[in-house]
Amino acid sequence: MNLDDYRSVFMAADLVLILLAAVPTLSLTAPFPSGEPFSELWVLGPNHMIEEYPFNVQVNESYSVFVGVGNHLGRASYYVIHVKFRNQTQPLPNVTISEPSPLSGLLEYRFFVANGGTWETPISFGFLELSRQDDSLSVSRMSINEAVLNLNASTSWDSVYDGFFFQLFFELWLYDTRQESFEFQNRFAGIWLNMTA
């Protein structure tokens, strides 16, 4: 190799080193392609873990979970979470056709989340008034974060699993600026509750 060959090799190596050093700086100013944009929704137990969810619940007791949202859409976004309550036979959202549950919401939470940010809130709930007659159980009042809500929810005894089961669930909606309305995001999460005691 002559001197010009060495010079070419050193110039190429210097160029590679300059580009490698510039990548962290470029990533701060120039957007690089990432995965598909999405929103995430979660429900965690009372100790911020995916465990110890309330299950066997009783009247006049308080229970808690944490509900959170992560924004990976590439922009700040405006969300709403609808809190809903159902028995085993009532419909959940149908994510195959992007339809929310037709059940009425009990409460809603509206909030903004920056791109790459998260939002989380504690949810405390309890049941204030239950009535049982033979093989059916009705819930007429519950509380969520100190708001007292009147319900008309009932279920029948499940002889397979030996219990009266309900589900508290959360639907995620996103504000669509083109439609100027909230749209269901095909995300929902919930917990099952057994009211046999």
Image (cartoon, rainbow, N blue to C red):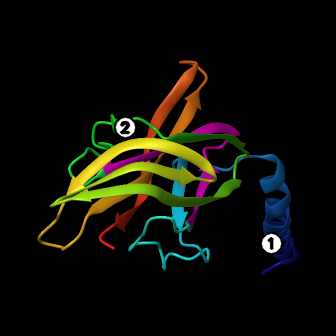
**13 sits to left or right of 103:** right
Is the residue marked by circle 1 packed among few (<14), some (14-19), or many (20+) residues within 10 Å?
Answer: few
Residue 5 placement (x, y as % from top left): 80, 73
Answer above or below: position of 194 versus 120.
Answer: below
Q: Residue at x 61, y 74 (%)?
A: 48
Residue 152 higher or lower than 68, as above or below = above
The label on residue 100 is 2
Q: Nearer the viewer, residue 121 or 88?
A: 88
Residue sitting at the far top: 179
Which residue in the structure is indicated by mark 1? Answer: 13
Callout 1: SS: helix
Q: Which residues are magenta?
A: 64-86
Three-letter amino acid code of the residue under disc 1: Ala
Q: Look at 33% across and 49% down and name the residue there.
A: 86
Question: In the visual, does 5 lie left or right of 82?
Answer: right
Which one is in front, 47 or 161?
Answer: 161
Q: Residue at x 28, y 62 (%)?
A: 165
Q: For numbered disc 2, what is the local secondary structure? A: loop
